[in-house]
Image: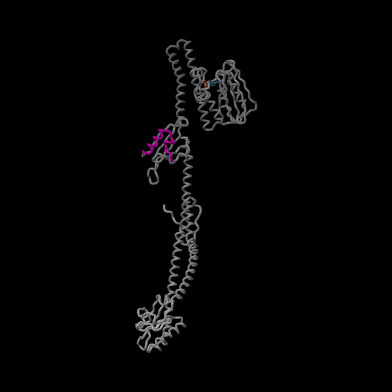
Amino acid sequence: MKKKKRLIWQIYPSFLLITLISLMAVTWYASYSLRHFYLEETASDLEARARLIEKHILEHFNPPDEKQIDALCKGIGKHASTRITVILLSGRVIGDSADDPESMDNHLDRPEIIQAITGKVGISRRYSRTLEKNMMYVGIPLRDESRTIGVVRTSMPLISIDKAVKDVQIKIAVAGLLIAVLMAFVSLWVSRRISRPIEEIKKGAERFAGGDLHGRLPVLDSEEIGSLSETMNQMAEELQERINTITEQRGEMEAVLSSMVEGVIAVDVEERIISINHAAAKMFVCSPSKTKGRSIQEVVRNTVLQQFVKEALSSQKPLEKDIVLYSNGERFLNTHGSLLRDAEGNQMGALIVLNDVTRLRKLESMRREFVANVSHEIKTPITAIKASVETLRDGAMKTPADAERFLEITEKHVVRLEAIIEDLLSLSRIEQEHEKEEIRLSKDKVREVLEAAIQVCRPNADSKEVELALVCDEDMVANMNSALLEQSIINLLDNAIKYSHEKSKVQVEVTQTGSEITLNIKDHGCGIEREHLPRLFERFYRVDNGRSRDLGGTGLGLAIVKHIVQAHKGRVSVESTPGKGSTFSIHLPK
Ligand code: ADP
């Protein structure tokens, strides 16, 4: 690009040129007029002198006394410092103040003589070979009555005029030079005055262009520049306002997007990410700021979702699909895709909304699993009861011993069914009350609750000769629902006795730390393999199905314990060594 000149270097040279041309023109015209004036003055002076001499010469002209005339010329010429020449009509010189007339050539060809012979005043300027100088000649006709009888010519060297003109020219030139220097400064000052506000506006405009819209341009007196500054200031103000509005709107939009639980991804028609919110970035383990402009294939390593984006871009209707992600554990995403359009309705890309329904799906599958488990649990006793009833009807009833046996079997399974239903009911009651926050907690003595539970379990313990020991401060209190906590201790004690060897010991021990009270139920029974521990508190989870059923277990005891403790905002834990025993702990917040 051609380098742009600064405004001052466009204005200043023009100013300077105009000034110099004007000065030169004025100088030339002044010296021309002066020279013209001098020449005219000299011509009229020479004419006046010729007229003065004319009378004296005419006195000696009838007939012409050449000697007298020549002497007269020389006499007057010497005093008047003017060369005087008298010439006859034939062109012969008969008197001359500067030379010998005899030696002078015929003067008929001289322009001033030719003019004077015709009766006019002849004026001529030329180089005189006689005097070897530039001279001015004025010839007037010598008249005897009405007849021209000769010519009187006065002449003067032009050297004095030239000198005078040159003097004046030098003075004018010096003055002109001074004026030129002065004008150079003045024009520089004027040029600056014009260009400086424009430069300031330029700097201001550059600041505006650079994004700094807070500064304002100075408004000057000059109408055009002043209104230019005003207009630009107004423009900056409006721009600032618009930018503020856009920033505000964008902030609001980003706040809305980032606080959404659903993941939102906007892609353009080339599948590049325009925007991605925090929830979506978290789902795909990436940072929202680093993904902008990158393609969806780079960011989302899930072929089903990539395909879904393609379909959403080419479909006119909104789409929906369930997608499973495996990046952060198994996650189920209910995904909606629709076209993204700009204000004019043109397609900009697609909008993908991802709803994490993992919890919902897990709950659904838990519900399904639970129904299957309950059905399975109930099916066994019902089948057994049905078989016993059929056997009785088929004849066993008639034999008292058989009848007794099958009725015993039936009773055992009915008891079992009752236990399952009771456990299920209490589990669902605890869950419901917990959800509705209906479980009332109060500060009660822990020891009293533990003693009551031990009391309930003692017959079972005694039948196995298991010793029950309690270690707990008399006055230790905890925030609890005594009835529910008692039930959970009974469940744990019941298990501890069930899975203990005969004549062993079960300890109930309460410890206290800064933030919680821990109730430990420790047995020295069969213990539990490590792999079962994480799932132990799930409903219907058993380590050994057959053994648990034989011992009258429903597989719901620990689930009930967990729910009761959760209602107390506490947690349960278990430590166990196979063959050595287990310790189940309830941690209650203080
Ligand atoms: P159950 O009614 O079968 O006892 P629970 O929910 O109370 O059901 O217990 C789940 C399973 O945990 C039991 O089947 C048993 O295998 C195991 N378990 C519970 N308590 C103990 C314990 N003290 N010692 C060994 N195993 C236990």
Q: Nearer the viewer, residue 392 or 584?
A: 584
Residue 355 seen from this side:
yes
Expressed as whole percent of the image width and height from the top left, the position of residue 18 reads: 44, 65
Q: Quadrant of residue 270?
A: top left
Q: How is the image coloured?
A: one colour
494 left or right, relative to 69: right
Does the magenta-highlighted stretch encompass residue 298?
yes
Q: Quadrant of residue 296?
A: top left
Residue 415 seen from this side:
no
Expressed as whole percent of the image width and height from the top left, the position of residue 418 reads: 50, 21
Q: Quadrant of the C terminus?
A: top right
Expressed as whole percent of the image width and height from the top left, the position of residue 128 reads: 40, 76
Q: Quadrant of residue 52?
A: bottom left
Prevailing secondary structure class for the magenta stretch in the rendered image: helix
How many numbered marks are there?
Answer: 0
Q: Nearer the viewer, residue 212 or 554?
A: 212
Image: magenta residue range: 293-314
Return the residue found at the far front. 103
Q: Nearer the viewer, residue 202 or 190?
A: 190
Expressed as whole percent of the image width and height from the top left, the position of residue 237 reads: 48, 53
Does the magenta-highlighted stretch encompass residue 342?
no
| Above-or-below relation of 518 to 336 | above
